[in-house]
Image: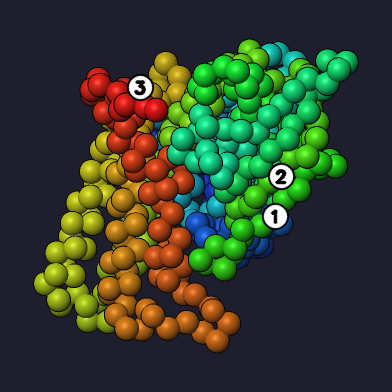
């Protein structure tokens, strides 16, 4: 895929850059760079206001069809937006789960009634979403879900019981898309349904999980006779596995190129830190920094190659290659930053005040786990990309 800017794309890039320059002022300018991994609590109200300002001016949901409020932007234009957004160091979005995961899923698999009901709230950032996938015994093995959903006697509502875990931003969400077991007799990859469940109701309890960074971005969620309308199942009943896998595909789309701009900023800052501490004069540190720079170039080239498959919808299983690669690269960068800091990296303030490098190191421990662990990504690549025999399953 040739991502060299055409004249139209150059004009689009200039439009994005100018808009960001004009609007990243005042309280929005003060929130630049806030809300990254391990810092999702930072300036949340300002970042929500910023997201709504983006929506007001048509900068949310760029890839959505125009009939649902999007711009029907090309892949190249989506890449441009994410790159310029990252270069401007704009605040981290609060609505990405709804916009980048559920929205495309509803457009691909939802009924027209579901699209009309839920897409406007996502586009305008008036309803926030979280993802109800993982459970204590169903993390990387998502098909082991035990949360149940049964239709009430009158058939008007689904009744949910069970527990979800590692649910990012559940404490702030209005809705959750939940994978639940609707046929307990079916094989575990079948008998699952994809339900849209309101969070603000009796029977939904959210308990924050304290992370290594002393923040609580993700949560446990308990459903005790929680309810949602019978019509709030996406796709067919008992076909939730297919819908859930499609959502994961959307998760690894175009925005990864913007993510890499942020990675470049972090790497440049680690190099500057190494100059200040004198670590740059150590051959092993210099070698690792050089390898990190080369590795980041490889990430970008692989992401660009992956974009060639987007014309037909969500990225395929090859997107697992990108997840595996960037997660390990970012984890290694956190370790490198701590080695550049040296002994000073082991000391915090009296109230466990972490600096940016300590937070990076601690939070990036999770990069190779969330969104599909390294082990699962390797299985996906082996079985669905390389065509190797499937791993024996009990």
**Residue at the left extreme?**
283
Q: Which residue is mark 2?
A: 222
Circle 1/circle 2 CB separation < 8 Å: yes
Q: Which residue is mark 1?
A: 207
Q: Residue 358, relative to residue 42: is it above or below?
A: below
Res. 263 image quadrant: bottom left
> Which one is in front, 140 or 275?
140
In the picture, measured across the screen, residue 265 lies left or right of residue 363, that is left
> Which one is in front, 323 or 390?
390
> Which one is in front, 364 or 227?
227
Q: Is residue 318 visible?
A: no
Identify the residue at image location x=46%, y=74%. Answer: 355
Identify the residue at image location x=19%, y=63%. Answer: 288
- Disc number placed over residue 143 in the picture, else none: none
**Residue at the bottom extreme?**
350
Q: Is residue 349 visible?
A: yes
User: Could you say where residue 2 lies in the image, as x and y percent from the top left?
Assistant: 28, 27
Circle 3/circle 1 CB separation < 8 Å: no
Q: Which residue is mark 3?
A: 309
- Please tell me whether mark 3 sits on a helix, a strand or a loop: helix
Q: How many marks?
A: 3
């Amino acid at each position: 895929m040739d991502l060299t800017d055409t004249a139209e794309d150059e004009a689009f890039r200039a439009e994005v850059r100018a808009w960001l320059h004009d609007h990243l002022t005042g309280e929005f300018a003060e929130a630049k760079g806030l809300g990254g991994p391990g810092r999702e609590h930072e300036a949340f109200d300002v970042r929500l206001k910023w997201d709504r300002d983006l929506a007001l001016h048509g900068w949310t949901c760029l890839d959505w069809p125009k009939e649902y409020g999007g711009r029907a932007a090309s892949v190249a234009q989506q890449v441009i937006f994410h790159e310029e957004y990252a270069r401007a160091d704009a605040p981290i979005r609060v609505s990405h789960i709804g916009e980048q995961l559920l929205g495309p899923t509803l457009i691909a698999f939802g009924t027209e009634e579901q699209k009309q009901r839920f897409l406007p709230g996502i586009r305008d950032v008036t309803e926030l979403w979280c993802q109800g996938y993982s459970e204590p015994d169903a993390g990387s093995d998502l098909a082991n879900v035990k949360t149940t959903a049964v239709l009430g006697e009158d058939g008007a509502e689904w009744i949910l019981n069970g527990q979800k875990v590692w649910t990012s931003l559940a404490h702030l969400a209005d809705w959750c898309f939940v994978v639940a077991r609707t046929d307990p007799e079916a094989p575990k990859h079948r008998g699952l349904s994809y339900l849209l469940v309101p969070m603000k109701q009796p029977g939904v309890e959210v308990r924050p999980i304290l992370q290594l960074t002393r923040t609580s971005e993700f949560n446990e969620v308990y459903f005790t006779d929680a309810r949602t309308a019978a019509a709030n199942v996406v796709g067919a009943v008992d076909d939730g596995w297919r819908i859930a896998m499609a959502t994961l595909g959307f998760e690894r789309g175009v925005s990864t190129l913007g993510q890499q701009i942020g990675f470049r900023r972090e790497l440049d800052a680690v190099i500057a830190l190494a100059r200040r501490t004198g670590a740059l004069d150590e051959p092993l540190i210099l070698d690792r920094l050089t390898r990190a720079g080369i590795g980041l170039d490889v990430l970008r080239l692989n992401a660009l190659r992956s974009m060639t498959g987007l014309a037909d919808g969500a990225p395929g299983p090859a997107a697992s290659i990108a997840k595996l690669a960037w997660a390990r690269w970012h984890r290694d960068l956190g370790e490198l930053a701590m080695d550049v800091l040296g002994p000073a990296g082991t000391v915090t303030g009296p109230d466990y005040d972490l600096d940016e490098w300590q937070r990076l190191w601690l939070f990036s421990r999770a990069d190779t786990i969330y969104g599909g662990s390294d082990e699962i990504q390797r299985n996906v690549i082996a079985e669905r990309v390389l065509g190797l025999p499937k791993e024996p399953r009990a």
